[in-house]
């Protein structure tokens, strides 16, 4: 579809309003498409603004397949990754919107069920003293902890992304190097992709009225840099690299560890590989 064939953002939003607004989930999206109310748009194979400079001049996205590793045995829950991500990608400074976040899993003696909390938890927000800062509360101080660990989470850049399938305007698409992006000039803020994501990795940027998510700092990796969260991690818990390069940090991480992915049953084929997590982590 030619770029000039796309309706303007106000026109698309007006159209969506006329048909009843955004539906609550992907099922509603499919239903609307069946009725002919919303045209099904296939994922893009090239950026909206075509040209050799996208995303970086001379960058060939057919030569890479990016991947991400997380070593939960190393993560200390310092949240530097979260803060770096918000600064690098202009993520709203509040307790509800994240491109990447960290969860804490705690097994207490005598309890069968694991306790899970994150920086978005009200107790953790209160502990920081400000919704613009993120710290884990010392809620388990003095408790008999059998085992505890932190799990960084982010967009899994799925090989078969559900978010791309449900987007009614083609704003969400998967690049040829394996990263799922959102073209915010096309996004109408319907929220279908947010509902469809099995990992809860998307949010609605209320300031812009569009969907947003982790892109593994696409503007950085296409210039030969590391994602901001990887660069600031003080313990090397986050690993990034090219899966086509057998000697990249990510390829070595996969080869030298018994890795696993989250929710393999979803069929999305995620490209974030974990080490050191329990079955409770989903």
Image (tube, rainbow, N blue to C red):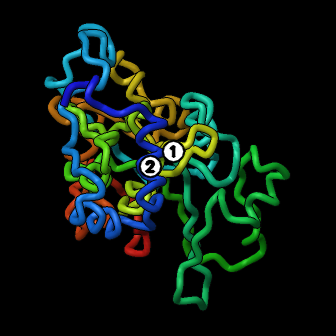
Q: Quadrant of residue 69?
A: top left
What's the residue at 59%, 42% (across, down)? 82
User: How far separated are the C-alphas under marks 2 and 1?
Assistant: 6 Å
What's the residue at 61%, 81% (across, down)? 108
Q: Closest to the observer: 259 or 226? A: 226
**Up-down: is 49 above or below 149?**
above
Badge number at residue 184:
none
Q: Closest to the observer: 158 or 66? A: 158
Q: Position of residue 253 (x, y in %)?
A: 28, 43
**Up-down: is 184 above or below 130?**
above
> Of all residues shown, which one is farthest toward the right?
129
Q: Position of residue 58 (x, y in %)?
A: 24, 8
Q: Earlier in the sequence, mark 2 or mark 1?
A: 1
Q: Is residue 71 left or right of residue 131?
A: left
What's the residue at 28%, 23% (across, down)? 4
Q: Position of residue 100 (x, y in %)?
A: 51, 46
**Up-down: is 260 above or below 220?**
below
Q: Closest to the observer: 250 or 210? A: 210
> Of all residues shown, which one is farthest toward the front?
18
Q: Which residue is mark 1?
A: 99
Residue count near mark 1 (Cα–Cα under 10 Å), binned few <14, some 14–19, many ≥20: many
Label 1: state its secondary structure. loop
Q: Are the residues tagged 2 and 1 within 8 Å (C-beta)?
A: yes
**Up-down: is 239 above or below 245?**
below
Q: Is residue 10 left or right of residue 183?
A: right
- The answer to whether residue 27 shows anywhere in this view is yes
Q: Which residue is mark 2?
A: 154
Label 2: state its secondary structure. strand
């Amino acid at each position: 579809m030619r770029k000039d064939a796309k309706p303007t953002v106000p026109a698309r939003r007006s159209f969506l309003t006329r048909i009843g607004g955004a539906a609550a989930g992907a099922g509603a999206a499919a239903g609307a498409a069946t009725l002919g109310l919303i045209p099904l748009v296939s994922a893009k194979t090239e950026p909206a603004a075509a040209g050799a400079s996208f995303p970086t001049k001379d960058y060939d996205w057919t030569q890479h397949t990016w991947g991400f590793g997380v070593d939960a045995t190393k993560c200390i829950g310092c949240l530097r990754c979260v803060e770096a991500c918000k600064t690098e990608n202009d993520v709203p400074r509040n307790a509800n919107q994240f491109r990447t976040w960290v969860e804490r899993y705690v097994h207490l003696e005598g309890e069968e069920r694991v306790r899970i909390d994150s920086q978005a938890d009200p107790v953790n927000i209160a502990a920081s003293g400000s919704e613009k800062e993120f710290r884990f509360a010392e809620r388990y101080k003095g408790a008999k902890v059998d085992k505890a660990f932190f799990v960084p989470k982010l967009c899994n850049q799925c090989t078969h992304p559900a978010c791309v399938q449900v987007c009614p305007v083609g704003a969400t698409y998967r690049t040829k190097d394996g990263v799922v992006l959102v073209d915010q000039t096309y996004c109408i803020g319907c929220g279908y992709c947010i509902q469809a994501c099995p990992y809860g990795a998307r949010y609605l940027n209320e300031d812009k009225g569009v969907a947003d998510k982790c892109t593994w700092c696409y503007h950085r990796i296409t210039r030969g840099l590391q994602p901001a969260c990887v660069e600031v991690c003080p313990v090397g818990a986050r690993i990034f690299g090219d899966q086509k390069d057998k000697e990249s940090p990510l390829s070595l991480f996969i080869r030298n560890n018994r890795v696993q992915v989250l929710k393999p049953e979803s069929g999305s084929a995620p490209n974030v590989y974990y080490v050191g997590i329990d079955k409770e982590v989903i």
